[in-house]
Amino acid sequence: MITRQRFNMPTTEVRNSAGDSIQLHEYNGKYYPLLPHIEGTLPQLPDLPCRDDDVMILTYPKAGTHWTWEIVNMLYAGDGQISSRRKGESMMEAVTVESLAALPSVRLLNTHLPPEFYPKDLIKRKCKVIFVQRNPKDVYVSFFHHTKKFKPYDFKGDWNSYFLMAVEGKVDYGTWFDFTKQYEQFFSGHPDIPVLRLYFEDMKQDLPTEVEKICNFLGLSCEPSYRDKVVEKCGFQFMKNEKKIPESFMNTMVNGKEDPIFRKGIIGDWKSHFTVAQNERFDQEYKQQMKGFSFPFEQYM
């Protein structure tokens, strides 16, 4: 039985060293987005009852979450159509625990939250995890545009200002570095959890192969003809056209009428944003932060 709990999660104006700010929730010294149900949901997630066939799609924001969710959903549905369902329905921090409990199987749970909120029952049941990563430079450029698009952030700065927010850890979900390192340690401490690591860049360059990897990992049958249909329907531009209308809870939260989740979906957009100095600073930060960690990512940067 799930008991509704409440706690005080204040809205905080988080400022960078240049004086620009973002509106976020603060909980235990970390920042989270102003999602409708997050205040009541976060403390209950570790005790969320789970099912043996639950699948977790785990990413840092803007690393390909929606894309991966649509692919996996279509593979399970078997109808070759973009679903009328929305990924947000099973985003753990965006809905109530009662809503999560009411979802039909197979539940494609997804989150950007750090390991402290990972349901203990998912660990116990050894539920499958699809962990998607992307060049962190492209991640932050996409996150910048996402933050500008969503009204609740109330962020009025430019890219240079947002870059400071990102490297100073003054964005929702913390830094990409902390997220990646925390999950590296989490998976290392729970070697029985089956994890498929995917890279956004590999998906862009050879989606048929990555779809086959997902099928094999999930134990699904995927004939070449159906695989090709999934690849066609889950192409970025096709999905962007299909998902033009924001999810219902976003309707009053975004600037503009199109879903802000799908923007460009390309590799290397960071090159049109990063200055030489910013790139050097980020590379230095990467070397310092990721030293000693096994996550093989340099080849994608």
Image (cartoon, rainbow, N blue to C red):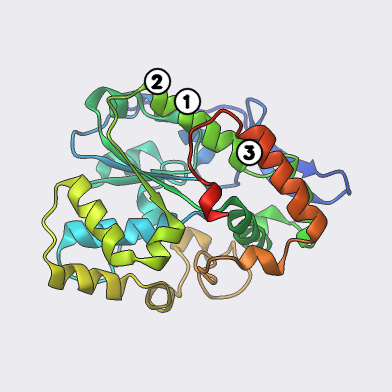
Q: Nearer the viewer, residue 209 or 234?
A: 209
Element assignment for label 2: helix
Q: Dot 1: few (<14), some (14–19), or many (≥20) neighbours within 10 Å?
A: few
Q: Amino acid at mark 3?
A: Gly
Q: Residues within 10 Å of mark 2 (few under 14, many from 20)?
A: few
At a point 14% along the width and 52% down the height, the residue shown is 220
Report the side of 160 relative to 86 (left or right): right
Residue type, label 1: Gln
Whether tag 2 and tag 1 are in contact, CB under 8 A, the answer is yes
For mark 3, what is the residue?
174
The residue at the point 18 percent across, 33 percent down is: 52
The three-letter amino acid code for the residue at tag 2 is Gly
Q: Give the labeled residue for mark 1.
A: 185
Point 70% across, 46% down: residue: 283
As drawn, 44 above or below 172: above
Quadrant for residue 207, please give it. Answer: bottom left
Q: Is residue 147 left or right of residue 58?
A: right
What percent of the width, then of the height, locates residue 92? 41, 41
The N terminus: image quadrant: top left
What percent of the width, then of the height, locates residue 230? 24, 69
Residue 189: numbered disc? 2
Side (left or right) of 193 relative to 42 = left
Please say if the residues under marks 3 and 1 sit with CB atoms less than 8 Å apart. Answer: no
State which quadrant residue 236 falls in: bottom left
**Whether residue 199 is situated above or below residue 265 in the rendered picture:** above
